[in-house]
Image: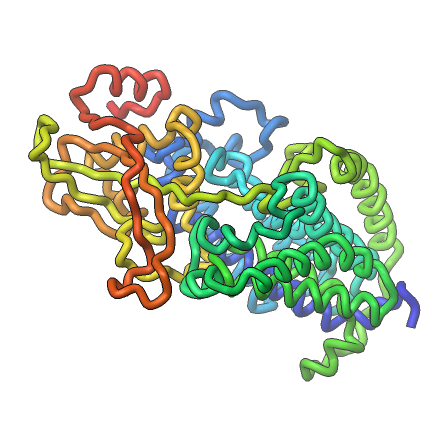
Amino acid sequence: MTWLDGSQYILTRFCFQRALAFVYFIGFLILVNQGLPLLGAQGLLPFKNFLKRVRFWDSPSLFFAVGSSDRAFRALAWLGLGLSVVALTGVSDSHGMAVSTLVWLSLWVLYLSFVNIGQTFYGFGWETLLLETAFLAIFLGSNDSEPPVAVFWLLRWVLFRVMFGAGLIKLRGDPCWRDLTCMNYHYETQPIPNPLSYYLHRLPEKVHKFSVLFTHFVELIVPFGLFGPGAVRWVAGGLTLFFQLSLILSGNLSWLNYITLVLTIACFDDRLLGYIFSFHHAVPATMGWVHVGVLGALGVLIFMLSIKPTINLFSRRQIMNTSFEPLHLVNTYGAFGSITRDRMELVIEGTSDSVATPQTRWLEYEFKAKPGNPARRLPIVSPYHYRLDWQMWFAAMSGYENHPWILNLLAKLLRGDARVLGLMAHNPFPNSPPRLVRVRRYYYCFTELGDKSGHPWQRALVGEYLRPLSLHDQNFLAVLRDMQWLEA
């Protein structure tokens, strides 16, 4: 076997394509369920306003061509979901190179179109990671063609940057990664802890320090093995896979770890996977010269676009989760460069009173995943992603001036907007909207093991985040008008 022997990657390609299609399915499912309340014409950040401020070449999207209506948004989201099912079932790859390429290209163009108009709600690193990975998948071919080994090497290059970038940003960032104390805080202060996070937080100090050391090893040393010969590459891929599985078990980090798991598949070939899966296939046709030429051009393109991300990777001023061009073909990555020590949460409350007094009874809105009621059990939602819940976690770290969309969220609650309320787990005003809403900031921490209350959280009021607001507040209405959020 030579490193160019594509016949040893038939099962690898099969597993990679199905796994990637699953991540696509989750991504488009989120768009179908949450897209319009977040980005639609009456959403929190209407993308029609965004399209007026940017040029196509700065943020390429099909919506420049099909328009900014909710109908167009819904149609493209459902089309993407349908195509992801086609890819997941393998129908696309069993009908020849042309069909396979068209399906994977369409999925990439569709998802790119949403990410480029998604603004704050699509500013996460896993969006660009999915786009970069999915772009390379366009060139993997169909079941009747020889798998292109060069693409698997390019996928390993993506995985290297994901892992090594995350490792370097930790060493350059928060000192707790250097004194081995980060895991003392992470399980409790991560965006959306899961049930296991509660128990992991209580592990002995020595275990936490070992976890940090293992993280450094997997992110800074192991990535170089991704380019090694068979056994070395398998071990590196296996360690990376194990590390990502441990992250999945310890928290709800959307599909960040799932898409990284997909990339680890590129580290294995049929010699190893054949021991795990029973898979029979016909001998594919040898790669044609046209295909070879396209792959050569792809290699040159990726090499040229990798220059800036590579310079950033080794820069003392390294930035993470950034694209250097609007197609997100080659990006820079990193995760948890800094760790939050104290957990702050925003709690939205409403009242039917027209004037707030010390006797006013305030009722809380409950989100679907983020901490709210201290008695509520910790959720398991990964790989699904509640985008509003995540943004509320970021908003709690600074003033609302840095997260102005929260003002539109409050305006929607005052109007009883059904779509936005659909993003919530509990609406305390089912019959008529509140007359006043406010936002308060709380300090949250896990209860002790064996706490008599049986609650996972305890909390203490820190202070007011946003004063009581109503639709009769002229200053509030003026801000909504300036942001083009005020509905006719």
Q: Position of residue 439 (x, y in %)?
A: 27, 34
Total numbered badges shown on the rendered structure: 0
The front one of 296 and 333 is: 333
The answer to whether one can see residue 35 in this image is: no
**Outermost right residue:** 2
Residue at 48% of width from left, 58% of height from top?
Answer: 251
Left or right of residue 422, residue 387 in this image:
right
| Among the 4 quarters of the image, the one containing residue 464 | top left
Residue 469 lies left or right of residue 345; in this view the side is left
Give the camera-side residue of 81 and 145. 81
Direction from residue 222 to residue 133 in the image, left or right: left
Q: Position of residue 47 (x, y in %)?
A: 44, 31
Q: Where 166 sits versus 12, above or below? A: above
Residue drawn at 29 percent across, 33 percent down: 463
Q: Quadrant of residue 480?
A: top left
Point out the image quarter for the N terminus. bottom right
Q: Is residue 36 above or below residue 27?
A: above
Q: Position of residue 275 (x, y in %)?
A: 73, 83
Res. 168 image quadrant: top right
Which residue is rendered at x = 68% and y = 84% of the image?
Answer: 278
Q: Position of residue 483 (x, y in %)?
A: 37, 20
Location of the C terminus by quadrant is: top left
Vertical side of 306 occupied by 206: above or below? below
What residue is drawn where x is 58% and y is 65%?
245
Residue 393 appears in the picture as rendered = yes
Q: Is residue 70 above or below residue 188?
A: above
